[in-house]
Image (cartoon, rainbow, N blue to C red):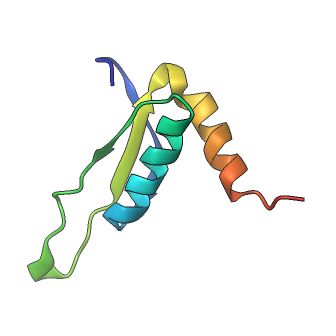
């Protein structure tokens, strides 16, 4: 990802779901990264969300791609 402003397009509580989302965005030419994957504290039984972020310039198209993934196909 380029340096600059990042925006969150999705949040998860498991790393696998975040990786799948990052892969989907990458297949569509949008670089994405995970933030917060190391913040889970097992001893407190509390998991912080993992955020998938993209460059601000890619934010709108990333939301469209992820929204299309959630929509039922006809």
The outermost residue toward the left is: 43
**Rendering quarter of residue 8:** top left
Q: Position of residue 34 (x, y in %)?
A: 31, 46
Q: Position of residue 37 (x, y in %)?
A: 23, 56
- What residue lies at 40% left-to-right and 38% top-to-bottom? 53
Name the image quarter holding the N terminus.
top left
The outermost residue toward the front is: 27
- What residue lies at 28% left-to-right and 17% top-to-bottom? 3
| Closer to the camera in the image, 50 or 66 | 66
Q: How many marks?
A: 0
Name the image quarter holding the C terminus.
bottom right
When the figure is inspected, residue 21 is found, relative to residue 56, above or below; the finding is: below
- What residue lies at 9% left-to-right and 81% top-to-bottom? 43
The outermost residue toward the right is: 74
Residue 6 horizontal side relative to residue 46, left or right: right
**Rendering quarter of residue 6:** top left
Residue 63 horizontal side relative to residue 42, left or right: right
Q: Position of residue 14 (x, y in %)?
A: 35, 67
| Closer to the camera in the image, 33 or 28 | 28
């Amino acid at each position: 990802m380029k340096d600059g402003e990042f925006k969150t397009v999705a949040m998860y509580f498991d790393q696998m779901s975040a990786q799948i989302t990052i892969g989907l965005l990458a297949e569509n030419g949008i670089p994405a990264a995970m933030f917060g994957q190391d913040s889970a504290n097992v001893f407190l039984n509390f998991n912080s969300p993992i955020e998938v972020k993209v460059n601000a310039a890619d934010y709108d198209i990333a939301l469209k791609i992820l929204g299309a993934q959630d929509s039922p196909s006809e």
